[in-house]
Image (spheres, rainbow, N blue to C red):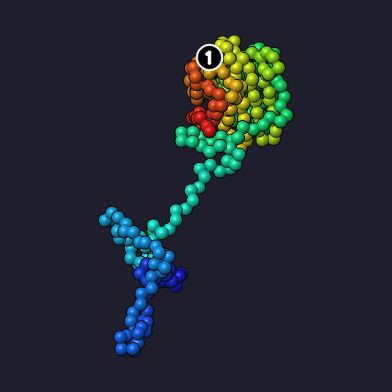
Amino acid sequence: MICSNILVLLMTTFLVNGLTIPRNVPDNNGGLTKRSHLIKPLAVYNVQQQPTKVKASESESPLTNAQRMAAGMLPAFPRVLEGLVPPRARKQSKRGNEGGSTPSPGTVWIPEEPKMDHPTIIFSDTDDASVKKEVSFDIKIFDKMSSTLYISSNGVLSFKKGTSDGYNTALPTHANDFPSYSVMPFWDDLYYSGYQDHVTFQTDAHSFQVKYQARSHSESGYIDVHIYYITSKPGVFYLYYGSDTTLDGDSATVGAQGGSVKNGNSKYVSYDYDTAKTITPGLKLVIDTNGSGKIQKAS
């Protein structure tokens, strides 16, 4: 170890200070004269050493190189070489984001919107209804896990029971015995009319998807929202609002809640409650029900 440290120190000294060697050069009398010749490796590569301004407290190492080597440490890296070392490539802030979008300032990463290649229509030409669906894994909403999901025609996903309530309220809520554990991609008084108006569902071993394409009794317009849940991100719901969405949230609730609302110990996150222009075509949201929960825009 000490030999390696000595070698590193010698090489560092050579790079910075150069090496002086004797050399025979012709003199004016036709003879040879020995002169010292300085070899500086950095000069070979035409590297200019720029002066570096440092604070007084940083100008000297707390330990000399001899002390560092005696302690089994490598010599201190010469400050003059710091500008010659290229910075390391920055690591990706997210892993496994192939196929997704790169986050912009103030937004979070979201997977690329998945395709529904074998969807099942669960609502069509329907009003105020709810259906129970089983999946092969546990879904997480805050501190509750369940493999049974209730899907409401009015834009609500819930545990334990469904709801046909289309009169949205602010969160948290237990109005009309509303489900305590629920996610609302677009809770409104929705209805379905025509071949394009329906709710579709799809699941496999590791994910489920629900897509609402509906109209509202509350205001004129259309909602197209796609919900994606994957087991590798428990408690996280990805929402994709389609380009043909015209309902802007003026009569809807978007968020999630969990726990006993009646006992006052529920957790909830809310993105929209009856606020115009909150929902826009192409909007992407991430509802994270882990911990105290949060909702963020994504790109």
**Residue at the (67%, 20%) spot, across then down:** 199
In the image as oriented, which residue stretches furthest toward the left? 56
Up-down relation of residue 2 to residue 78 (above or below):
below
Q: Quadrant of residue 79?
A: bottom left
* Residue 4 seen in the figure: yes
* Residue 154 seen in the figure: no
Horizontal side of 286 relative to 47 (left or right) equals right
Residue 125 or residue 266, whichever sits in front: 125
Percent of width and height locating residue 179:
58, 19
The count of marks equals 1
Percent of width and height locating residue 76:
37, 63
Up-down relation of residue 173 to residue 292 (above or below):
above
Q: Amino acid at mark 1?
A: Ser
Q: Secondary structure at mark 1?
A: loop
**Residue at the (60%, 35%) spot, across then down:** 112
- Mark 1 lies on residue: 251
**Residue at the (48%, 17%) spot, across then down:** 275
Residue 157 or residue 212, whichever sits in front: 212
Residue 147 or residue 100, whichever sits in front: 100
